[in-house]
Image (spheres, helix red, strand yellow):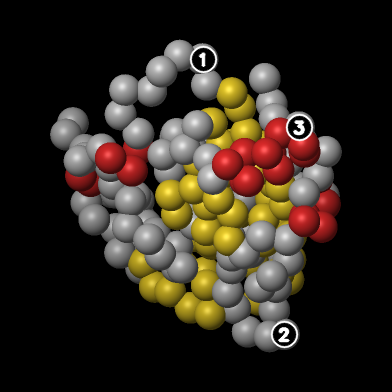
C-alpha cells in the first residue's frame, strides 16, 4: 500500500521519514516532489566496464541552465536529502519531466528501508532539452513494509551508497563479486 499525504505527514512527525529541505507545498496526494540539485556528472570514458571503477566528472548546472544531449548518460542528484526508516521509498519521474523526454532513472527507482542520502539520478533524454537546478524532477512515494526488517540499509557493512553527498555518485558495480 502507498502512503497518503496524511500518512506521509504523520511519518515525518514521527521521524520515520525525513526530507530536507522540506516544504509542505511539494506534498502531493500520495507523493512528495523532489528537485534537481545543482550538480551533474558524466563518465570520463565513453565505454563503461562493469568490473572497473568508471570515474566521473562533476560540474555545476549554470544559472542559465544546461542542455542535455541524447546518447549521453548524465548522473544528477536530488536537492533533497531523505531518510526512510520504516517504509520502502520509490522515486518516479514527474509526468511533466517525462513529457519533456527526460528519464530520471534507468533502473534505480527503489530505495531500501534505512536509505539515508540524496538520490542519484540516471538522466537521459529523447532530444536536446534545457534543464535547471531546482526544477521539479521526480516524486517519492512510500510503500508499507510487510514484516520486520532484519538489517536496515544504513547499517549494512557492504552497502555501497551510504556516504552522504550533495553530488551524484557513480556506479559501484565494480565492488560486487562476479
Q: Residue at x 72, y 85 (%)?
A: 64
What number of labels is visible?
Answer: 3
The residue that disc 3 covers is 4
Q: Which class describes the residues within 10 Å of circle 3: few (<14), some (14-19), or many (20+)? A: some
Instruction: Look at 29% across and 46% down and name the residue there.
Output: 160
Residue 125, numbered circle: none
Q: Residues within 10 Å of mark 1 (few under 14, many from 20)?
A: few
Task: Tell me the SS state at disc 2.
Answer: loop
Instruction: Give the residue pinned by disc 1.
Output: 146
**Residue 173 horizontal side relative to residue 167, left or right:** left
First in sequence: mark 1 vs mark 3: 3
Q: Is residue 120 left or right of residue 28?
A: left
Say which of 5 and 120 sits in front: 5
Res. 145 in view: yes
Up the image or down, 114 lies above or below 68; here it is: above
Q: Is residue 95 above or below residue 24?
A: above
Q: Residues within 10 Å of mark 2 (few under 14, many from 20)?
A: few
Amino acid at each position: 500500500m502507498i502512503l497518503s499525504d496524511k500518512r506521509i505527514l504523520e511519518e515525518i512527525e514521527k521521524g520515520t521519514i525525513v526530507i530536507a529541505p522540506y516544504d509542505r507545498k511539494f506534498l502531493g496526494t500520495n507523493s512528495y516532489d523532489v528537485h534537481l540539485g545543482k550538480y551533474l556528472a558524466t563518465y570520463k570514458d565513453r565505454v563503461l566496464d562493469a568490473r572497473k571503477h568508471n570515474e566521473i566528472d562533476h560540474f555545476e548546472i549554470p544559472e542559465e541552465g544546461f542542455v542535455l544531449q541524447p546518447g549521453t548518460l548524465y548522473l544528477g542528484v536530488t536537492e533533497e536529502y531523505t531518510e526512510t526508516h520504516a517504509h520502502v521509498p520509490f522515486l518516479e519521474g514527474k509526468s511533466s519531466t517525462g513529457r519533456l523526454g527526460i528519464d530520471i532513472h534507468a533502473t534505480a527507482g527503489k530505495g531500501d528501508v534505512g536509505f539515508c542520502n540524496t538520490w542519484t539520478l540516471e538522466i537521459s533524454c529523447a532530444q536536446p532539452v534545457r534543464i535547471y537546478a531546482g526544477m521539479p524532477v521526480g516524486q517519492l512515494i512510500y510503500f508499507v513494509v510487510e514484516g520486520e526488517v532484519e538489517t536496515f540499509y544504513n547499517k549494512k557493512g557492504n552497502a555501497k551508497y551510504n556516504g552522504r553527498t550533495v553530488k551524484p555518485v557513480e556506479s559501484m558495480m565494480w565492488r560486487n563479486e562476479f
